Amino acid sequence: MDSSADAFAPPVAGWIPVSPRLATARRVTLVLVYVLVIAGGVVLALTPLPVLWLVVYAVAALAAFVWTWWIIGRRVRSFGYAEREGDLLVVSGILVRRLVVVPYGRMQMVDLRAGPIDRWLGISTVQLHTAAATTDAAIPGLLPADAADLRDRLAARGEERTAGL
Amino acid sequence: MMQPRRTSPLSPLVQAAPALPAAVLFFIGPGAAIVERSGIPFVVLAVVGALIGYAVFVAVAWLAWWRRTFWIDDDGDLRLDSGLIQRSARRLQLSRLQSVDIVAPFLARLAGLVEVRVEVAGSGDSRIILRYLTRADADALRGLILQVTRAEESDDAPQSQALAQVPAGRLLAGLLLRSVTAGLLLATILLLVVTSLSQGPAGLVLVIITGGLPILSVVTEFLANYDFRVARTREGLRIQRGLLSTQSRTIPPDRVHAVSIVSPLLWRHWGWVRVTVTIAGVQGDEVRPDVLIPVAPRDEALRLLAEVLPDVDVDALPFESAPSRARWRAPLTWRSLACAITPQVIATRSGRMTLRTSIAPHARVQSVRVTQGPWERRFGLATVHADVAPGPVDVAGRHLAEEDVAALAPREVDEMRRARLRG
């Protein structure tokens, strides 16, 4: 990283993006949530409330759906990571931007995980753990082969750096 | 090295004591029905019921006590065999000893007993708590364990040098004058005045909350930190404190991950500060010390700090302050916000009513995080966090100029690497 004014400036090698399938996975979750929202609307329609309420509910739900659908795409595109010589960088977020730098020597554990929707779409998450609970270094939306490679590489580097202790 | 032995024979009586109120409650339910039928006075029934319940618990605790033995074997391991039916044999490698603590909980203290906690490095099964021993036995066991762990060293008596102690008056004054406590108490007085003038009961419910909460917290902290003493021993800083139950705990300097110097507004007149610390490794331990000194003159506190963080001059940290445009993001605290990086540590400053300086050695920082919320971005600000082990200390340089953060974050990463290479 150079010392330009941008605290989130990309490293020399640039950010590696995550798979767009992550957006699909999150949109599938959104649709599942909206099954409940629609069920709520049906219940609302069966009660003797003024029609106006139902309209307000539907409009609000639709607006929230469109906005979330759109923001998911942007959020997923905002994810990026970079493996440098001594540390791993993870960047994310649109509204609140985040950059985490984890030196390989500080890693305690590297996790690979994938929920049911992730497995169905063929993506997984690599998460780094250090002795600090606040280290927030998860890279979602990796293709399984990439994720396994990344995990093995990180674990090997972590061992290399801590071996001398 | 040591014959297997049991804990004090009075232990079952103490261990079963918490069952007493439960036993009373249990007999109140069925008791009410029996009272109606038999005419036996309720008090008699409750007492008899409580005693029967207590006796049952004592009997169970006694069987467990009888089957529980501990000793130090020839390999220098602390062994604990226990279990009535399902036996368990535990073994702690004393060569990896972290601490031996003697704690006197209230009930045990009534019976003149203490508990001994032995902790070794490592996760999982790394701690044995012996409940309960007499004070003399506990001291002897502690001496023996320390002797085993440094068989190679020839020094006999553990030297201990008193460094600081907090007088009860200063502790009480300090607790009452903490910003939130003082504010709530002031609000309570105002509410009382208003209520008595208006002759209505309206404010009284509020008074119970605004007055009760701070009084409760003052009393709890006063009891916990009464007679607070810090001494330097060979294992680290030894902290003893407590009125109803005394606690004693050693902070090995190499396990201090971060410290925070806190000075509430009303303390500054006397120049008092509080120092909290994050100690890594021990999770969910009620005697984990997070306070190095609850209230002390700044000089004294800084001397204590130098014991756990040598080579740091707290008054000469090269702070880079937040720019004046940070007032739009943090109108109250922007003047104090700052971050400094020295060859040894990263330090951050924050707060207005209560000023906080947090310091973490580079070797203890786990990762560096930069965050920027929408409002920060609007004014070209950003926050840099140094992530440390979980604890009371949060090292974050908030709302600094984005160009400063862009320089500070990589510098901290470099220093972390260098600290690691130094070991």
Image (spheres, grey):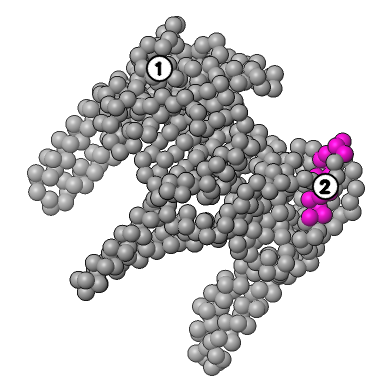
Horizontal placement of B139 versus A148: left or right?
A: right
Give the residue at x 62% y 61%. Answer: B245
- 10 Å crowding of disc 1: few (<14), some (14-19), many (20+): many
Of residues A141 and B155, the one drawn nearer to the viewer in this rendering? B155
Q: What residue type is disc 1 on?
A: Ala
Q: Nearer the viewer, residue A7 or B16?
A: A7
Query: Dot 2: within a 10 Å radius of its alpha carbon, few (fewer than 14), some, or many (20 or more) residues?
Result: few
At numbered mark 2, what does the secondary structure look like: helix, strand or loop?
loop
**In the rendered view, does B191 fall on the left or right side of B73?**
left
Image x and y of residue B209, in percent: 35, 62
Q: Nearer the viewer, mark 1 or mark 2?
A: 2
* Residue farthest to the top, as pictured: A13
Q: Quadrant of residue B374?
A: top left
**Mark 2, residue position:** B157
Q: Is residue A74 visible?
A: yes
Q: Foreground: A74 or B150? A: B150
Q: In the image, which residues are magenta?
A: B139-154
Q: Look at the picture and state if A9 lies above or below B216.
A: above
Residue ID for mark 1: B406
